[in-house]
Image (cartoon, rainbow, N blue to C red):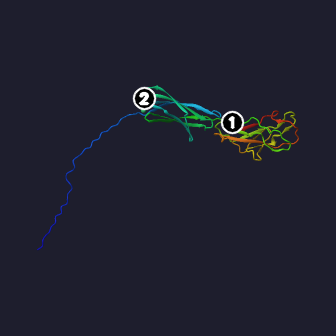
Amino acid sequence: MLLALTALFLVPSAPDALAAVTNITFTVHLTVGNYPPTIDWIVTVPAQDPTEAANTTFYVWYNVSDPDGAGTINNNTAEVVINRSGVSLTAISCSNATINGTMQTINCTMEIEYYRNAGGWDINVSIRDISSAFANDTSNSFTYNMLSALWMNTTAISFGSVNIGQTNVAPNSSLVLNNTGNVDFTEVNITAYDLVGFTNPSYSIAADNFTVRLNASTLGGDVLDNVTNTTVTGATVPHGAPPASNESLWIYINQVPGGLISQDYNTTNSLDWWVLVG
Ligand SMILES: [Ca+2]
């Protein structure tokens, strides 16, 4: 007898009743506690001229508003930075005055050195309120003009007492040229004149007995000539902070010529020598 054995497997079916809809509520809360300040107005900065070998001072004025009240503007955070080609200069001081209930005016003092590059400089004006909310404006600029200026360390050089035939006579002082503007000088020239006898001007020492060198220890150099503009080989006077803006010139006597009488020889009875840069 066969028994039919039937197993009945019950597969649980998915629950046919959904969970009850449940709500979770939350509240939204936002406190408007601070309005940021705004920079309303900046006085146009006129073009500035460099001051030879010194700083030029100028001012950046701007107005700042804050609806929370003029007293909430943190004047200690007032700042002006000017930028050109990676160089940044910050205001040395700023002062303020209250205009009305929501506005301050700020006046910042800037100083720019004579050797800074000529051209356009960007102006970055900024300030914060007492909640550190920030405002800035970078839309302004000014022009820094060019200045060609040169300073020299002395107005006279001397070779003291020399002897006939003496060679390679050094002066008492080099000529130190310093660029006191912001324009590069890429060429230096010297115009020499024969040295004429002070007591008896019928004797003279020709200018071509002199050379100009860049270094006291280097022989050679450029031979000078009477009433002639001689370019000093390798001499430049670039703009920049000293000593990069310096060039030294050494004028030597190659050899004291013969045929002279004993007396002073100088430029009194001829003309002063010239240094000309360009
Ligand atoms: Ca505010």
Write the residue at 60% across / 32% down: 56
**Rendered location of residue 129, percent (x, y):** 45, 33
Mark 1: amino acid: Leu
Does 101 sit left or right of 174 as displayed? left
Q: Which mark is residue 3?
A: none
Q: Residue furthest bottom?
A: 1
Q: Is mark 2 within 8 Å of ligand 1?
A: yes
What amino acid is found at the position of numbered circle 2 in the picture? Gly
Which part of the image, by quadrant, shows the C terminus?
top right
**Quadrant location of residue 70?**
top left
Question: Residue 111, how many percent across, how many down?
Answer: 58, 33
Which residue occupies 45% across, 28% down?
Answer: 103
Above or below — where is 63 with respect to 256? above
Query: Which residue in the rendered view is the most extreme toward the left?
Result: 1
Label 2 sits on residue: 69
- The residue carrying mark 1 is 150
Residue 130 lies, in percent from the top left, at: 44, 33
Judge left or right: residue 66 versus residue 233: left
Asked if labels 2 and 1 touch by Cβ distance under 8 angstroms, the answer is no
> Closer to the camera, 184 or 60?
60
Q: Residues within 10 Å of mark 1 (few under 14, many from 20)?
A: many
